[in-house]
Image: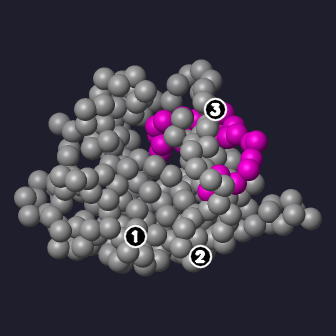
Amino acid sequence: MARHARSIAAAGTLAAAAAVALAAPGMPGNARAQAYQCRVPSGPVILPNVRRDGPVRRVPVGGYTLALSWSPEFCRFREGNARHARQCSGREGRFAFVVHGLWPEGRRGGWPQWCPTDRRPSQTEVRASLCMTPDAGLIAHEWAKHGSCMVRDPDGYLRITRILWNSLRWPDFDRLSRDRDLSASDIRNAFADANRYWEPEMVGLVLNERGWLEEMRLCYDTRFRPARCDARRFGPADAERVRIWRGL
């Protein structure tokens, strides 16, 4: 009975995410444009074993966060790092925003994590995700830590993530990066202007200690509709200055 209930829940989650994608207007500048000349390895993709780095936490889900890493900033000073060669060396493509992970959020604070599972994503779904998340180790980690608390099927988790990812439209971040007076509000407004159902208060940001953009965190409700971010996910105040590293 529990397995049947989880299967029904997974189907509903996929349907909700698909509804978001269908509602998105068909226009240029979608998420695929965030990867330039991305190449998927011809052979099998090795998924490393994932070690739990925190406690198991089962709490009711009250929403979701799609965490998007700004790859030029992540790869700054990592170009020669073998661990991050696929994302940062340039040999497998150049990346702008990439998916860090899709995270369930707790209904009353905290977040579910490390729900027990022995399942792993299939080669088919991992390969289909490598231009969205160009690190197989990160894909394996995000499923084990976060996705396992959303659905039973790791392939379903990756499909949900890709549906949300492919529904997004992107403003010109190269132009934004050249604005010497760029603020957090400017980034939030530019994203909301490019995406029909988004408002600036639904767009969280993460800056490093020097004020450079590291991540964008998009907030969703339990039906994967854009939702207002809480203070923890919203990040810097609108007036805070932001710099964007172009990686050139």
Q: Is residue 123 left or right of residue 229?
A: right
State how far apart marks 2 and 1 are (Cα). Answer: 14 Å
Instruction: Say whether marks 1 and 3 touch (CB < 8 Å).
Output: no
One can see residue 104 in this view: yes
Residue extent of the magenta highlight: 113-136
Residue 149 sits inside the magenta stretch: no
Query: What residue does disc 2 label?
Result: 107
Q: Please name the residue shown 28% across and 42% down the image.
A: 72
Q: Where residue 123 appears, x then y in whole percent?
A: 66, 33
What is the magenta segment's predominant secondary structure? loop
Q: Secondary structure at mark 2?
A: loop
Q: Is residue 233 left or right of residue 206?
A: right
State how far apart marks 2 and 3 are (Cα). Answer: 30 Å
Query: What residue does disc 3 label?
Result: 49
Residue 93: mark? none
Q: Earlier in the sequence, mark 2 or mark 3?
A: 3
Mark 1: few, some, or many residues within 10 Å (few <14, many ≥20)?
few
Q: Where residue 92 appears, x then y in whole percent?
A: 40, 27
Mark 3: few, some, or many residues within 10 Å (few <14, many ≥20)?
few
Say which amino acid is labelled 3.
Asn
Q: Earlier in the sequence, mark 1 or mark 3?
A: 3
Mark 2: few, some, or many residues within 10 Å (few <14, many ≥20)?
some
State how far apart marks 1 and 3 are (Cα). Answer: 30 Å
The foreground one among 54 and 122 is 54
Query: What residue does disc 1 label?
Result: 232
Q: Is residue 158 left or right of residue 26?
A: right
Residue lying farthest right?
1
The quadrant of the image that shows the C terminus is top left
Q: Please name the residue shown 47% across and 45% down the image.
A: 132
Q: Is residue 50 above or below residue 12?
A: above
Q: Earlier in the sequence, mark 2 or mark 1?
A: 2
Say which amino acid is labelled 1.
Arg
